[in-house]
Amino acid sequence: MAVTLLYYTPDVPSAATSAERALLEEIAAREPGIVLRVLADRWDAEREAAVGIARTPAIVPLAEGGHDHGIRYYGAPDGYEQETFLALLRALAARESALSPATKARLRGLSAPLHLEVLHAPT
């Protein structure tokens, strides 16, 4: 597995961001192929726009070689979301998604960039 997690977090940690960072550190510690880079700085609109994040905290998962698929994860990947987050990391590492061939073909047919947000409420 070769995945880099860029974790953009505010320079002043909160209980939520401290817990989120601890979870990401635990994931990285358990899998040698996952590298965590914590970027705990003041908001820099130019830098954040360059990497395509709209707010912090944000997790930017990069595939091997730093390939950015445009995935941005906002919020802690814990609870029910943890398995989905781990599946994302496995897919990036394997360079293969679980999408059906028909879905992949349909996505290749898109003529313009697509912005998709999935919102999930804690349970």
Image (tube, grey):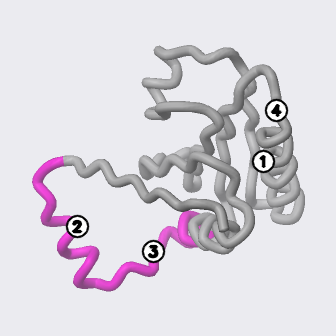
What amino acid is at disc 3? Answer: Ser
What amino acid is at disc 4? Answer: Ser
How packed is label 1: few (under 14 Cα within 10 Å), some, or many (20 or more)? Answer: some
Secondary structure at numbered mark 1:
helix
Q: Is residue 14 magenta?
A: no
Residue 75, numbered circle = none
User: How far apart are the two marked residues, 2 and 3, measured between alpha carbons?
Assistant: 13 Å
For label 4, the residue is 14
The magenta span reads 90-112
Q: What residue appears at the point 61 percent right and 32 percent down from the top-left corner?
A: 56
Q: Name the spot of residue 13 as percent of width and height, x first.
A: 82, 29
Q: Name the spot of residue 21 as percent of width and height, x first.
A: 81, 44
For label 1, the residue is 20
Q: Nearer the viewer, mark 1 or mark 2?
A: 1
Secondary structure at numbered mark 4:
loop
User: How far apart are the two marked residues, 3 and 4, measured between alpha carbons?
Assistant: 34 Å
The residue closer to the viewer here, 96 or 45, is 45
How packed is label 2: few (under 14 Cα within 10 Å), some, or many (20 or more)? Answer: few
Q: Nearer the viewer, mark 4 or mark 1?
A: 4
Does the CB distance between marks 2 and 4 fall below 8 Å?
A: no
Q: What residue appears at the point 66 percent right and 59 percent down from the top-left corner?
A: 2
Q: What residue appears at the point 55 percent right and 55 percent down from the top-left corner?
A: 63
Does the CB distance between marks 1 and 3 fall below 8 Å?
A: no
Q: Quadrant of residue 39?
A: top right
